[in-house]
Image (tube, grey):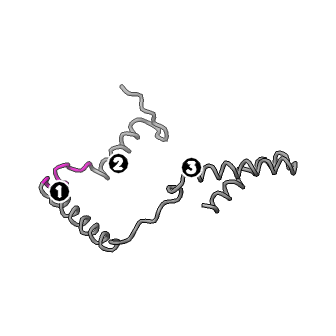
Amino acid sequence: MTDIRTKGFESPAQLREHLAELEEESPAEDPRAVDVPSADQQIAALRREVADLRARLATIREQTNGMDAPPSRGEIHPWLRVAATVATTYLLGRLVQRLRLGAPGAAAVPMIASQLDRRMW
């Protein structure tokens, strides 16, 4: 027999009584009583949904016809952007060394370079 913990109950009989009450309050549903659409109905519903999505897509295409997509950032010259970031970081590092700003200045170099990179491109 399985060892069931009866925490909160004084006896196993009280536990069985409680479980019987719970079962009476929410009886299990009969699986045959649930209204499940047939496969043909589900396929018809999916076809209607696909037709609706196609109509919406056609509307969107009509609205955007003739519009050129904006070029994404960095696609035109990706290596130029990398080279500029490296050069900026190097120059800022040298500046920090010249001004003798120490560890706080050296920690700020990558943050400053990334801000400059965002603003330049």
As drawn, the residue found furthest toward the right would be 100
Considering the numbered disc 3 on the image, is that residue within a helix, a strand or a loop? helix
Amino acid type, mark 1: Gln
Q: Residue 22: give its label.
A: 2
Magenta region, residue range: 28-39
Location of mark 3 (residue): 79
- Tell me residue 50's x, y (percent): 22, 61
| The stretch drawn in magenta includes residue 33 | yes
- Tell me residue 39's x, y (percent): 14, 52
Q: Is residue 97 left or right of residue 119?
A: right
Considering the numbered disc 1 on the image, is that residue within a helix, a strand or a loop? helix
Amino acid type, mark 3: Trp
Tell me the CA gap for discs 3 and 1: 52 Å
Task: Say few, some or many: other residues with alpha carbon within 10 Å of mark 2 (under 14 / 14 to 19 / 20 or more).
Answer: few
Instruction: Give 56 or 84, whichever is nearer the viewer.
Output: 84
For residue 18, above or below residue 62: above
Q: Residue 84: give its label.
A: none
Q: Is residue 34 left or right of residue 93?
A: left
Location of mark 1 (residue): 42
Compare marks 2 and 1 and give the one earlier in the sequence.
2
State the residue at coordinates (36%, 43%): 19
Count the numbered circles shown: 3
Marks 3 and 1 in Cβ contact (< 8 Å):
no
Where the C terminus falls, by quadrant?
A: bottom right
State the residue at coordinates (63%, 61%): 120
Instruction: Give 13 or 36, whichever is nearer the viewer.
Output: 36
